[in-house]
Amino acid sequence: MSDVATHRKHFLSDKVSHFTESVIREMTRQAMVHGAINLAQGFPDFPAPAEIKQAAQEAIAADINQYAITWGAKRLRNAIARQMQAGQGVPVDPETQVTVCCGSTEAMISTLLAICNAGDEVVVFEPYYENYGPDSVLSGAAPRFVKLRPPTTNGGEWTFDERELRAAFHKHTKAIIVNTPNNPTGKVFTRAELEIIRDLCVEFNVLAVTDEIYEHILYDGTKHISIASLEGMQDRTITINGMSKTYSVTGWRVGWTIAPPRVTDGIRKVHDFLTVGAPAPLQEAGVAALSLPESYYQNLAEGYRKRRDRLIPVLSEAGFQCFIPHGAYYVMTDIRRFGFADDLAFTQHLVREIGVAAVPGSSFYRDPRDGAQQLRFAFCKREETLDEAARRLKKLQA
Ligand SMILES: Cc1ncc(COP(=O)(O)O)c(C=O)c1O
């Protein structure tokens, strides 16, 4: 049967027929089946801050159980606007610029659905967080990939070629997605790099959609810069963020967009028809979360730095070449020394025989061959979990 006939028979849309299942989520399922330590999916296995759990419980006890305003509870939008102003110096009107969504995942798809038409292109750096490809396709746009190249020196940074980036911009370019701090590379974009992106956005009249959910997870003195804070970008940036990573509550599903009023108007309409709203009591807990003192964020980053510095020597000793992350909580590795045919074969060996789950590098690239000798590990785990992973990885022979 031809491909078209097969899809007709199964009643699937052409869009969805191109999607593969999320590899990251699949690896979590495999970790459970094989009793493996899950260093695949980026969710913490330790508790969320007591204050915010308490705030969620109190909100439910106080019967905050019905729909919040579709674009977000006022108190939470106010807190989001305050945080953006305090952290990045960007003034935000919570009434016209903030939309609370079901996680930054929904924030991203609502944004792309609000801004893209069929025939538009969206520039995406690769390796990339795997949702961005399907998100672009769902919105009718075509992703256009620009390579981030791995560091050539120990502790160096992933970089892009300015000319290659410029060549990706043209009259059909609607937006560029920037994820900083970056998953999977751990790259933190510098001001100079963001300025290059800014200049192209202005020259080609393009929007920047920035995924900043790891903004507080930074190492080695790096600083997070929101592209919206650069001159000329406030009116052409959609900043996406959320509670998942900063407050260790990936299952709560609270995220948001900050965007110029006209774009916000579009995002709010899409968001309303897609999900109506994010969980109301957890939005109240979000107010408590965004009121935590500065020391909370320092401890968060320091805790992850320690985990990074625990896992990397273990991986290096086992035979992985590690690309040191300067932000977020993943480490990309080169697996060439192990001599496996590809990342999929090696990931299967790891999860079944060694008892550690990781994500095959190919899931972060359009052309799987580009990631066929890479693997990503997440280190957002308790010390005991990392110790057990270390014990198991000793069985691995490079
Ligand atoms: C870059 C990036 N964006 C978005 C998400 C999903 O975030 P949320 O839980 O807010 O939907 C993840 C989760 O791993 C991520 O790594």
Image (cartoon, rainbow, N blue to C red):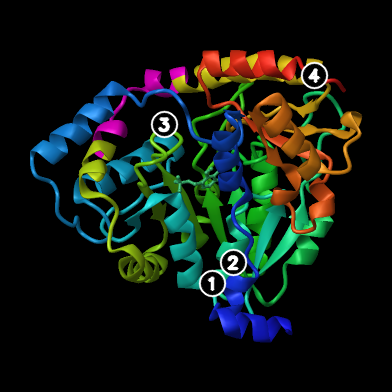
At horizontal 43% and vertical 33% (from top left) the residue drawn is 246
- Drawn side of residue 206 relative to residue 277, left or right: right
Could you tell me which quadrant the N terminus lies in? bottom right
Splitting the image into 4 quarters, where does residue 121 fall? bottom right
Could you tell me which quadrant the C terminus lies in? top right
Give coordinates of residue 345: x percent, y percent: 80, 42
Which of discs 1 and 4 lies nearer the camera? The answer is: 4
- Report if the beta carbon of the residue with label 4 is closer than 8 angstroms to ligand 1: no
**Real-space CA distance between mark 2 and mark 4, rounded to the nearest whole angstrom:** 37 Å
Of helix, strand and loop, which one carries label 3?
loop
Specify which label sits upstream in the sequence, 3 or 2.
Answer: 2
Q: Name the foreground residue: 318 vs 285.
A: 318
Q: Name the foreground residue: 68 vs 397.
A: 397
User: Is-magenta flag for residue 128?
Assistant: no
**Real-space CA distance between mark 3 and mark 1, rounded to the nearest whole angstrom:** 29 Å
Splitting the image into 4 quarters, where does residue 333 fall? top right
- Marks 1 and 2: in contact by CB < 8 Å? yes
Specify which label sits upstream in the sequence, 1 or 4.
Answer: 1
Of helix, strand and loop, which one carries label 1?
loop
Label 3 sits on what residue type?
A: Ser
Label 2 sits on what residue type?
A: Ser
Q: Residue furthest left?
A: 62
Residue 211 visible in the snapshot: yes
How packed mark 4 is, by other alpha carbons closer than 10 Å (few <14, some 14-19, many 20 or more), is some
Q: Which residue is mark 1?
A: 139
Label 4 sits on what residue type?
A: Ala
- What secondary structure characterizes most of the magenta part? helix
Range of magenta residues: 287-299
Q: Which residue is mark 3?
A: 248
At horizontal 26% and vertical 42% (from top left) the residue drawn is 282
At horizontal 82% and vertical 58% (from top left) the residue drawn is 164
